[in-house]
Amino acid sequence: MSVASLSAKAKVERLGKLFKGRRRGLVLTHDNPDPDSMAAAVALAAVLHSRLGIPTDVAYGGIIGRAENSAFVRVLKLPILPIAEVSLEGYDLFALVDTQQSVKNHALPEGVTADIVIDHHPTREEALTNPFADLGSGAYGATSTVLTEYLRAARIEPSPELATALYYGIKADTRDLERQTRDPDVDCYLWLFPRIDRNLLAEIEHPQLPLRYFRLYHAAIEKARLYTGAVITDLGEVYSPDMVAEVAERLSFLEAAKWSLALGSFRSQLYLSLRCTDRRMNAGRLIREVCDGLGGSAGGHGSMAGARVPLVGKKHQRAETRRDVVRRFKASFGVEGERGVSFLSDEA
């Protein structure tokens, strides 16, 4: 049931009517979660516990590998667990945050329906069948904004750690209120700011980086190819899936590149991250069209999107999958047949 048109106060009241009396809840982020997903999940757990009296845990699939994301969890002491440490039999309330059930980039098993789905990404129609579906459809730049509205409506004063988490979630997903930002994002950002711990925020934003981080960036630049209006780099095997998104984000600043695409493999999955600087284009729609029929999952919105495609078979078959994916994107970018120029070439 969609509740997106209701006020935040009415949404919190609806949660109470639907789920009060449940014994224990589990909130799941999307796999390999980013700060927006983790902050929103912890905030939802706080609402369920404080307003409904439901003890609630937060868990994630995949890994938290990027330096800023690891620092985010460590510095703020966020109560979030790997899904491997959770026994699903102990829960009678399930929630998905910053993702939707059909996207399948989460750890909720097949056959288990999420009671609650909260996401700022475009609505998948099938998600409206969940008992409580609050889907942004472009009204929000971050899921952390949605959950900040819940806290305010429920009159829950966040701890400095939770306020910092939500603030950074909005900051990261909207790129300092510059990308896909709506009025609620600005309002919640300003409401949270006096409540954050700026010392903790500085620790998150400026973490120590491992040597492999710089090696990966070295490989990204060596392998990048520049086409007319697009840049593509295949990172090979990566130590963390979310580094693919970080590289795509960084390459989006390249002059004259409307599209930036990074891909890298991790544990027999090919991760793709797409950025678009042309407001007339839609990265989420394009990545779903390109990856249709390849299995896995894909999603996003106007300027940023991601996908995960299974890599199966022998080494040469996996290599062909990578080449096929790149060919599909080149055709969509309108650069099919172009050789592309190396960043290290004098022609670049």
Image (spheres, rainbow, N blue to C red):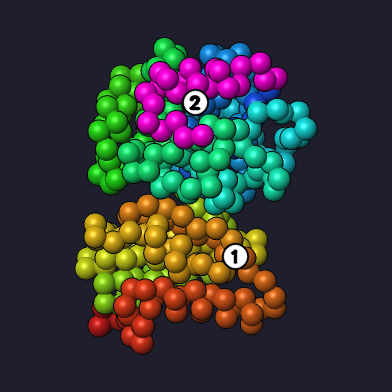
Q: Give the range drawn in magenta.
A: 1-23
- Spot occupied by residue 223 in the image (x, y as percentages of width and height): 43, 74
- Spot occupied by residue 44 in the image (x, y as percentages of width and height): 52, 26
- Spot occupied by residue 64 in the image (x, y as percentages of width and height): 56, 45
Is 4 one of the magenta-colored residues? yes
- Spot occupied by residue 228 in the image (x, y as percentages of width and height): 26, 77
- Disc 1 element: loop
Quadrant, the C terminus:
bottom left
Task: State whether residue 207 appears in this view.
Answer: no
CA–CA distance in space, label 1 to label 2: 32 Å
Position of residue 79 relative to residue 143, above or below, is: above
Identify the residue at horizontal 43%, vertical 63% (top origin): 287
Position of residue 207 relative to residue 264, above or below, is: above
Q: Residues within 10 Å of mark 2 (few under 14, many from 20)?
A: many
* Residue 43: numbered disc: 2
Kindly identify the amino acid type of the residue bearing the numbered disc 1: Gly
Task: State whether residue 140 appears in this view.
Answer: yes
Disc 1 designates what residue?
A: 295
Q: In the rendered view, does 41 fall on the left or right side of 23?
A: left
Q: Which of 304 and 348 is in front in this view?
A: 304
Identify the residue at horizontal 33%, vertical 54% (top origin): 302
Identify the residue at horizontal 55%, vertical 18% (top origin): 17
Q: Which of 5 and 50 is in front in this view?
A: 5
Kindly identify the amino acid type of the residue bearing the numbered disc 2: Ala
* Residue 17: numbered disc: none
Q: Nearer the viewer, residue 146 or 262?
A: 146
Quarter of the figure with residue 175: top left
Q: In the rendered view, does 81 fall on the left or right side of 302?
A: right
Label tally: 2
